[in-house]
Amino acid sequence: MPESDLTWLSLLVFLPAACAASLLVFPAKWHEAMRWWALFGAAGALAVSLCVVIGYYSMIDHYPDANGFPRYATETRLDSRADRAASDAAQPIPRVMQSDDWVTRRPWIAKFGAQYALGVDGISLPLILLTTVVTFFAIVASWKIDTSVRGYLSLVLLLESGVIGAFVALDFFLFYVFYEVMLVPMFVLIGLWGGERRRYAALKFVVYTLLGSVGLLVALIGLYTVNVRDFVDQEDVKQRAAELAKAEYGQTPSPEQVAAAHERVAVHTFDFVTLSKVGRAVMLVLNGQEERVAAQAKFGEGAPPAGGEAARQVKLFAPGVNAAAAVARLKAQPVCTKEFQYLFFGLLFLGFAVKVPIVPLHSWLPDAHVEAPTPVSMILAGVLLKLGGYGLIRVAFPVCPWAASELAWWIGLVGVVGIVYGALVAMGQTDFKKLLAYSSVSHMGFVVLGLAAWGSGTHSQYWQWGVNGAVFQMFAHGVTAAGLFFVVGVVYDRAHHRDVNRFGGLKEPMPLYSGLAAVLFFASMGLPGLCGFVGEFMVLAAAWDFSPALAVPAILSVVLTAGYLLWTWQRVFLGTNPDTQAFPDLSPREAAVLVPFVALAVALGIFPQAILFSWIDPSVTGWVANLSVLK
């Protein structure tokens, strides 16, 4: 029987790309058919993502935790599921792969151990769903694009496949491939379908993104050199030892020769889960707590007993490994040095900070937004920026937790600088798109601040609020930013300019448009009852517990945000302006794009628990639990 989650996850990743490739068979003049086919592909990806969400939710709801409650069982955490899948694959006779654990892996490039490893949890799934929703409505918003329609739609769908692939990849090499795949479509979309300075904006986007990519590439290569033999199933080590002994001593090596080969076996991997276990063990060693690192009784083992000395143990080594010998091997490697941890966390942080983007690596974003066509701006703000925050959660913090902990206050300061700087610069903009671009810089700063609010012991609950708030903020910002950039596109189609000071009076000729835009403005402002409030409130609560010095300017920035958004609303929609009196209200197609974003903004603000937190929080709880016990 085929592994069904392999089918679903692969379909989720490659369905848009397959639809993009099939556009090549359409006759050149069938523009309308191409649009509908692309919309069909995006709708298919959206439908598959909803099926995966339902399947994942059913899986976590099926397992009770130690207290008998659903959704929080340690067996359903991503690292536990990935460990079990890796162990099943490592056996001499591989076990039957589970079809409902939403983790799958197959050999890909055996020469250096790269795997086709996919998996989802409550952190990645909301962003996958956001990607499919935004891309679907971006294609609807692209209906009037009539230049090189085939190429445009193919690139949008290919971009969607790259983004989803990055969100589901559990192998660093595979993640890097998908991460780079996104670069070409976005570069071409801006460079060919953008405004007057599109080539400059596209080149700037590529230069900044490649700067981050170089950091990720160096980190990928450096982390691959780490010997992870004590963190993988020992059946894999035994098989490697037997192969090594045969290569050195012939087809029938003696037990002593196999044992000698066993001591020289080195295992290298790109697997995120394994690398994160190495990082956590290194943190305990560097903090002088190496006695707490222990071996698991079985792969995917749950939490330790509630009390006693065993509760302090952090079970990271594979079952059957001698902890003392494993710690000695770990300490002999460069990875177990402060310099290595600082350097590689810096490389990972740089790679993902460009995408967030943080100040001062943000200057590509306003130019890209200003020159990109409206649907591409929707995808850029609604989806691509989230890859930076996701990379920090999935890669940077778990793989180098010691450096992340040591630099937590400074990372929080970076987030606060972005929040305040973005709001101040947005206040001085007259270009509607550029104003929203700097607004995105400000709002994404909350994501960085929430992740940085590191807490352990009794303070881990506040850090959990911060990470929950960061994930929610990424989703909420994706909804409001995509909607607001479409708001700009609607009025640009009528006025053919984006100068805020030249609008005014839009409320009279365009009442439906003005009302829907108002909801998105207030949601972006963080008004209670709308989506922008929930994530920001949780991040600020966590930041206050972590460092009031960081929380105060972030809290005060709420006033700045309200100031520039309300001032923009006043200049664009209020008053009277003879130049805008003849503007038609929303067309049915435009309303079909804008209404769902408004509905999501309201629903997320009123029912955050039912819509997102019910399946985000279990994964965040596990993520925080893995790291908070290390201090």
Image (cartoon, rainbow, N blue to C red):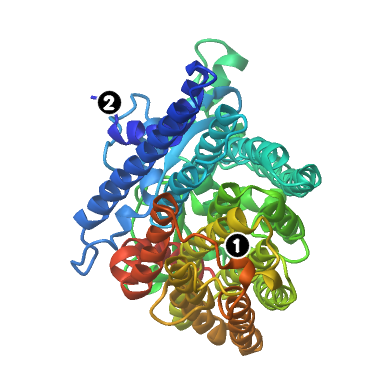
The residue drawn where x is 50% and y is 65% is: 480
Viewed as shown, does residue 41 lie left or right of 27?
Answer: left
- Disc assigned to residue 543: none
The amino acid sitting under disc 2 is Pro
The picture places residue 464, in percent across and down from the top left corner, at: 45, 73
For disc 1, the neighbor class at 10 Å (few under 14, some 14 to 19, many from 20) is many
- Disc assigned to residue 2: 2
Task: Report helix, strand or loop for mark 2.
Answer: loop
Front residue (pair 410, 475)? 475
Q: Nearer the viewer, mark 1 or mark 2?
A: 2
The amino acid sitting under disc 1 is Pro
CA separation in Å, label 1 and label 2 = 37 Å
The residue drawn where x is 25% and y is 50% is: 59
**On-image quarter of the C terminus:** bottom right
Residue 196, above or below 431:
above
Q: Is residue 456 visible?
A: no
- Which badge, 1 or 2, comes first in the chain's sequence? 2
The picture places residue 412, in percent across and down from the top left corner, at: 65, 74
For disc 2, the neighbor class at 10 Å (few under 14, some 14 to 19, many from 20) is few
Front residue (pair 139, 186)? 139
Task: Report helix, strand or loop for mark 1.
Answer: helix
**On-image quarter of the N terminus:** top left
The residue drawn where x is 35% and y is 64% is: 612
Front residue (pair 444, 264)? 444
* Label pair 1/2, CB-CB below 8 angstroms: no
The picture places residue 596, in percent across and down from the top left corner, at: 38, 58
The picture places residue 214, in percent across and down from the top left corner, at: 75, 44
- Disc assigned to residue 401: 1
